[in-house]
Image: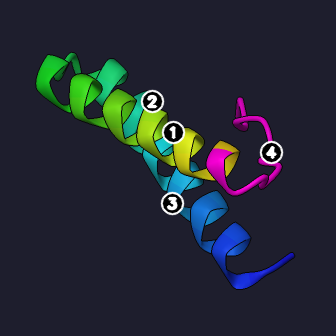
Amino acid sequence: MGELSRQIQQRLDNAYESLRHAHAEGDIYLVDISQEEIKELRRIAANNDIGIDAPRCD
């Protein structure tokens, strides 16, 4: 896995964790921000032919 792949995966992991936390806290603004960050990171990954792991559900 290259450096770009690792960075995108780490940022996605963080964004999904933030999204879970925002949902739990009822923070709609943070939910929106996290969803947009995830969408953008997935777009970057797709544009660079980078496979990404599915979000963890723990």
Looking at the image, residue 12 sits to the left or right of residue 27; the answer is: right
Which amino acid type is marked by label 2?
A: Arg
* Spatial separation of the CA atoms under disc 3 and disc 2: 14 Å
Mark 2 and mark 4 in contact? Answer it, CB < 8 Å.
Answer: no
Q: Amino acid at mark 1?
A: Tyr
Q: For residue 53, which numbered disc appears in the image?
A: 4
Quadrant where the C terminus sits is top right
Question: At x 54% / y 40%, what residue is drawn?
Answer: 43
Label whose residue precedes the other's in the sequence (1 or 3): 3
Q: Position of residue 52 (x, y in %)?
A: 77, 48
Give the number of the disc on residue 38.
none
Q: CA distance from mark 4 to mark 3?
A: 12 Å
Mark 1–mark 4 Cα distance, whole angstroms, equals 12 Å
Examine the rendered structure and indicate whether residue 10 appears above or below residue 43. Answer: below
Numbered badge on residue 20: 2
Under tag 4, what secondary structure?
A: loop
Foreground disc of the pair 1, 4 = 4
Mark 2 secondary-structure assignment:
helix
Question: In this figure, which residue is indicated by the disc labeled 1?
Answer: 16
Name the N-terminal-most of marks 3 and 2. 3
Residue at the spot 68% in from the left edge and 43% down from the top edge = 46
User: Circle 3 sits on which residue?
Assistant: 11
- List x then y, in percent, for residue 48: 69, 57
Of tags 1 and 3, the one toward the viewer is 3
Residue 36 shows in this picture? yes
